[in-house]
Amino acid sequence: MSLVFRRQSNAGFLWVALLSAGAITSALVLQHVFDVQPCPWCVLLRLIFIALGIVGIIGWLVQGQRLLRIFTALLALALALCGVATGLYLHLVASHSSSCDFTLADKIVMALGLDHSLPMVFKVGASCDAAVALVLGVPSALWAVALSVASIVVAVKALRR
């Protein structure tokens, strides 16, 4: 099976990877520079964007076979839908709750053990109502939703080709 590299035709996936890297970078700056500690839902969003960024890089680099293109686009679509759901839940529900212990996000983070293996990125440090951060006047959860929607557009375009 030979894989063909087509970078120009997959520029949308490169944008997904770059925007995901930007989202992770801004989250880490908020945490380590401005001391806005993440809640479990924030950490789950980080995990989703790291995975989406990796899929974006793969989608940008390797699109030689139709099946691989479809698989990459479907995976990006699934992750982006998870990003929309997580971001909306964080903004509409979790950020208004004083406790988000033992929610789905907390269980996923604890089960993966990433909070122990890479605590600078994945350690939960705040409750959901205390983790609300504004970036350019917009809650960070809504920025996550916007990035996820943009990723959905890229994935759908890739599926239509």
Image (cartoon, rainbow, N blue to C red):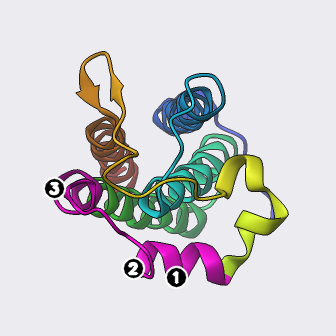
Q: Label 3 belongs to which residue?
A: 92
Q: Residue at x 68, y 78 (%)?
A: 112
Q: Are marks 2 and 1 in contact (CB under 8 Å)?
A: yes
Image coords of residue 142 (percent x, y): 26, 40
Secondary element under disc 3, as helix, strand or loop, is helix
What distance separates the C-alpha of mark 2 from that of mark 1? 6 Å
Secondary element under disc 2, as helix, strand or loop, is loop
Secondary element under disc 1, as helix, strand or loop, is helix
Residue at far front of view = 98
Work out whether mark 2 precedes mark 3 in sequence or the reverse, and give the earlier one.
Answer: 3
Image coords of residue 145 (percent x, y): 28, 45
**Badge 2: few (under 14), some or many (20 or more) residues near its Cα, within 10 Å?**
few
In reply to whether residue 95 is colored magenta, the answer given is yes
Q: Is 53 drawn above or below residue 105 in the view shown?
A: above
Q: Label 2 belongs to which residue?
A: 103
In reply to whether residue 71 is colored magenta, the answer given is no
Q: Which quadrant is home to the N terminus?
A: bottom right
Q: Residue at x 51, y 49 (%)?
A: 38
Label number found at residue 107:
1
Q: Residue at x 51, y 58 (%)?
A: 48
The disc labelled 2 sits on which kind of residue? Thr
Question: Which stretch is magenta?
Answer: 88-111
Q: Residue at x 53, y 38 (%)?
A: 20
Q: Nearer the viewer, residue 119 or 20?
A: 119
The disc labelled 1 sits on which kind of residue? Lys
Q: Quadrant of residue 140?
A: top left
What distance separates the C-alpha of mark 1 from that of mark 3? 20 Å
